Amino acid sequence: MVHIDDAAITAIRRYFVKNLPRSGVILDLMSSWRSHMPDDLGTARLTGMGLNSTEMRENPQLSEYAVHDLNACPALPFADGVFDAAVVTVSIQYMTRPAEVFEDVWRVLAKGGRFHVIYSNRMFPTKAIAVWRALDDRWRGQLVASYFTSGGRWEDITILNISPSGPAYSDPVYVVSGRKTVDVLQ
């Protein structure tokens, strides 16, 4: 079972096709048994990082994975500048130390790499942080944008509504993304 409906997953895949680098090295943070990547994205490598090795082992899209609890240790177990892009898909509401994580995502991205945070209004309320539960979707976007501004040197921070449109109800989908600032002192 997935956390969002098929139309929302399709919207996420369309976004990834337009916004993730072809032949890129991608980091899928808070990964699980599905990454929601389009099958024809053509990544060079998709690295998953999550809590459950069994679920990640069952994810057919991952090239490799690391078991790591970001809430216990926000430092990522990767070298500097090794990823072209990073994503968190419908899991940001469970992150308890976002500024530290966003700072370390900045570290592991290559110069100009983008970090894409996809969220919906779907969640496990007992696991989501209190501030997330208290906000509506618009303010959740502002909250995620604040993670970028407090957790690293990010630029071009954008908030997008990529929710499916149509006559039938679908889960809403939003993206907050930022680009790693090219720092001449790196």
Image (tube, rainbow, N blue to C red):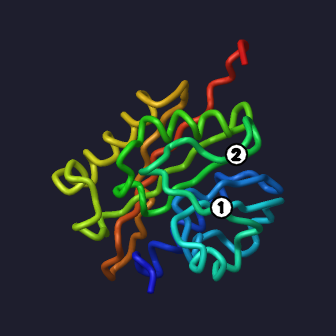
- Residue 108: x %, y % from top left: 67, 39
- Residue 74: x %, y % from top left: 50, 44
Figure quadrant of residue 17: bottom right
Task: Answer whether labels 1 and 2 touch (C-beta < 8 Å).
Answer: yes
Q: Nearer the viewer, residue 162 or 95?
A: 95
At 41% across and 42% down in the image, what residue appears? 98
Residue farthest toward the bottom in the current orientation of the protein: 1
Q: CA distance from mark 1 to mark 2?
A: 10 Å
In the picture of the structure, the residue carrying the numbered disc 2 is: 78
In the picture of the structure, the residue carrying the numbered disc 1 is: 66
Q: Nearer the viewer, residue 90 or 156?
A: 90
Q: Is residue 120 above or below residue 185?
A: below
At 34% across and 56% down in the image, what residue appears? 93
- Residue 114: x %, y % from top left: 62, 41
Q: Is residue 117 above or below residue 128?
A: above
Q: Amino acid at mark 1?
A: Ala
